[in-house]
Image (spheres, helix red, strand yellow):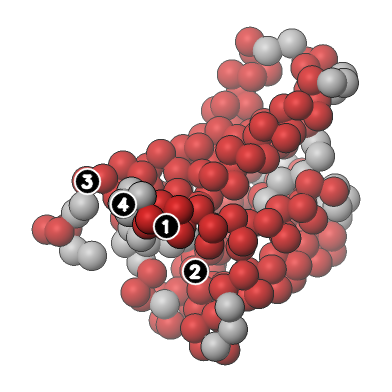
Amino acid sequence: MTPHTIDKKRFALMGIGNIGLGAFLSLLLQVGYGTDTGAFLNSSLSRRTGVQLGTVMLCFNSSLFIPELIWGRKYISYGTLVNMVIIGYVSDFCTFLENRYIPGYVFTDQPYRTAIFIGALAFFLASAAIYMNADMGLAPFDAIPKMLSSALHIPFCAARMSWDFLIILAGILVGGHLPVGTVILAFTIGPAVSSIGRLMRERGIC
């Protein structure tokens, strides 16, 4: 997609999806039941190095941008850069606001903690599906399973789950403690993206 053929609706969906990813990621991090696999690895690296999460995520995605640039150029567009740059920093900003204005017990005591986790998980999955199905480019982390699916002729869901479990292993190796929510997201992101994508196409949203 060139700068002269921007679909404003798709661009808006991409932006909403990415902002949603960052906002709901912050809630998932606060309750501590688990995040998506990429955030699991990056938050583990952030804790280990003391570097801000947004900066770690930007550096991580920048390193993965090289194979996307070589083998997956068709997945590169505006959404690629938006996702690479803003999600971690949106999460950091939302965490700052949550710590300032929301009582801490909401993230630690029941039933609030579980309720926030379930709600944030559902909206995080929806945000991921909206951003990816807007077809405005994929961040390197999300493009790699697409590239694997195409190269190996396997369903996207299988490629995504395989990629997610590889990233989980990397997160554990750098000192992360695997929570149940990360495992849930490893199994659900691929199917959620596919299912919500079909629904969006059926309703003419994208």
Q: Amino acid at mark 3?
A: Lys
For the C terminus, the quadrant is bottom left
Q: Is 133 displayed left or right of 50 in the figure?
A: left
Q: Badge 1: how crowded within 10 Å, few (<14), some, or many (20+)?
A: many
User: Element under label 2?
Assistant: helix
Cα distance, mark 2 to mark 1?
Answer: 12 Å
Tell me where residue 93 sits by quadrant: top right
Please tell me which residue is depicted at 71% across the width and 46% down the height of the picture.
Answer: 35
Q: Badge 4: how crowded within 10 Å, few (<14), some, or many (20+)?
A: few
**Mark 3 lies on residue:** 8
Q: Residue furthest bottom?
A: 152
Q: Badge 3: how crowded within 10 Å, few (<14), some, or many (20+)?
A: few
**Mark 4 lies on residue:** 204
Q: Amino acid at mark 2?
A: Ala
Say which label, 3 or 4, has the lower sequence index.
3
Whether tag 3 and tag 4 are in contact, CB under 8 A, the answer is: no
Q: Nearer the viewer, mark 3 or mark 2?
A: 3
Q: Nearer the viewer, mark 2 or mark 1?
A: 1
For the N terminus, the quadrant is bottom left
User: Element under label 4?
Assistant: loop
Cα distance, mark 3 to mark 2?
Answer: 22 Å
**Mark 2 lies on residue:** 143
The number of numbered badges drawn on the structure is 4
Instruction: Give above or below for 59 relative to 55.
Output: below
Please tell me which residue is depicted at 15% across the width and 59% down the height of the picture.
Answer: 5
Q: Amino acid at mark 4?
A: Gly
**Mark 1 lies on residue:** 133
Instruction: Give above or below for 60 relative to 33.
Output: below
Q: Residue furthest front?
A: 202
- Residue 15 position, x and y percent, is 37, 42
- Residue 58 position, x and y percent, is 52, 52
